[in-house]
Image (cartoon, rainbow, N blue to C red):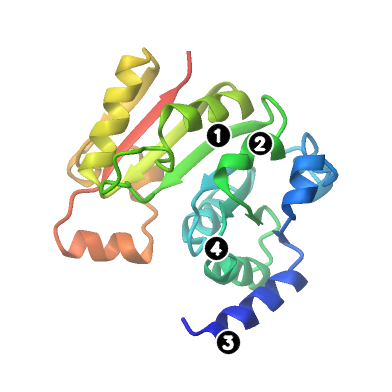
Amino acid sequence: MGSKNKLKRFKQNETFENVIQPTREEVFSNSLNLKGNWKQNFFKNDKPLVLELGCGKGEYSVNLARKHPDHNFLGIDIKGARFWRGAKTALEEKLDNVGFLRTQIELIDLLFEENEVDEIWITFPDPQIKYKRTKHRLTNEDFLNKYRKVLKPDGFVHLKTDSEFMHGYTLGLLHGLDENIDYAHHDVYGNSQAPKEVTSIQTFYEQQYLEENKKITYIRFKFR
């Protein structure tokens, strides 16, 4: 994507009513007035709040919003030029139960109150295989602690990825921490018992992975 196109999308994001782009100052000073009030102040309702972390183009958030009008969905990514597509689609389709937040995922515990979030989806994150340090891996222990903080008790976390490494790393970590693994499979499309909410939505890249015969893995878990 050219720099002019990116700038154009950034400008459009500023006009989209379903996009929030807080400054770091707003986040750290708690002056955004949304922490603890996302349902009331942003979605204007009291439906359960679901986050998609690293939402990319926003395809998964938009599709979840289409399928579940009784829930609010918030896609989170630092790359606003990517989720511009999902935000624009949601506005065109008048989907009022999906929005997008441009921020770093490591700041979520500053943007959401304890127990404010009902569910979390992590879809096709960068597995960070090349790096010895795991600080940017979205299922490392630091991130898990942040998710635990903002999630309601018994709230599910979903991890869907084409990376067997990410699947195995996360599964091993969860077992080591004695967390409650509700479902796990290394080939979700090859399992007849797979949840429909996982197999009924496919992103553009996911379709490409499947055409290349790559296995799609999935884990659903709760914190104890």
Choose the circle earlier in sequence order: 2 or 4: 2
Q: Is residue 61 above or below residue 14?
A: above
Q: How many angstroms separate mark 1 from mark 4 (CA)?
A: 22 Å
What residue sits right under mark 4 in the picture?
A: 79
Q: At 54% from the left edge and 30% from the top edge, which residue is drawn?
A: 147
Foreground disc of the pair 1, 4 = 4
Crowding around mark 2 (Cα neighbors within 10 Å: few <14, some 14 to 19, many 20+) is some
At horizontal 55% and vertical 34% (from top left) the residue drawn is 119
- Inspect the image, locate mark 4, and give the three-letter code of the amino acid beneath it: Lys
Residue 197 is situated, as x and y percent measured from the top left of the image, at 41, 44
The answer to whether residue 193 of the structure is visible from this angle is no
Q: Which residue position is annotated with label 1? A: 119
The residue type indicated by label 1 comes to: Glu
Sooner in the amino-acid sequence: mark 3 or mark 4: 3
223 or 135: nearer the viewer: 135
218 and 12: which is toward the camera = 12
Q: Quadrant of residue 114?
A: top right
In three-dimensional space, the C-alpha distance between marks 2 and 4, rounded to whole angstroms, equals 25 Å
Q: Amino acid at mark 2?
A: Pro
Q: Is residue 206 left or right of residue 8?
A: left
Q: Nearer the viewer, mark 2 or mark 1?
A: 1
Measure the C-alpha gap from mark 1 to mark 3: 36 Å
Residue 115 at x, y percent in the picture:
67, 25
